[in-house]
Amino acid sequence: MVSNPKPSTVSTMSAMTVTVNKRVNAGMKALAEEVSKKTVIACAAQYGFNEEEALAMLGLTMSEDAVSKPKMTEEQSLPQRKRVPLSPRRRR
């Protein structure tokens, strides 16, 4: 017998409330994290910055089952550049 977990309430915008159960909420969170990681990895490959440092800076750590790197065609990719460490932005 499958038990239904207690639903949690997530507010989006001020006039709308969506109620989803914890499993759906956890799945949506995992999906958003995976997409974010893949985006950072693709940008690191394209623009030559350190992906581990960028993921750490954003609070997205690589796990044991690391996300696979997205595949790019030769037309999409730029020539590989020297990897440059990220530095914090200076406030003016």
Image: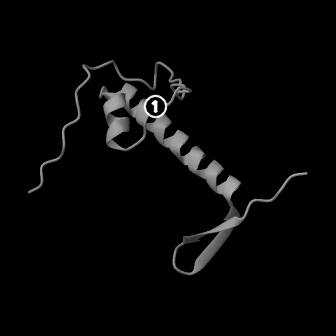
Residue 58, position in %: x, y?
A: 36, 44
> Tell me, what colour scheme is on the image?
one colour
Residue 36, position in %: x, y?
A: 48, 42
Residue 6, position in %: x, y?
A: 72, 64
Amino acid, disc 1: Met
Q: Please state, as top left, top right, bottom left or bottom right, where the C terminus lies in the image.
A: bottom left
Q: Answer with the quarter of the image where residue 46 lies.
A: top left
Residue at 12% across, 49% down? 90
Q: Nearer the viewer, residue 88 or 2?
A: 2
Residue at 55% across, 70% down? 12
Q: Among all residues in the image, which is located at the extreme right?
A: 1
Mark 1 neighbour density, 10 Å: few (under 14) some (14–19) many (20 or more): some
Q: In this picture, is 58 found above or below 6?
A: above
Residue at 68% across, 69% down? 19
User: Which residue is the site of mark 1?
Assistant: 62
Compared across the picture, whether 33 is left or right of 88 comes to right
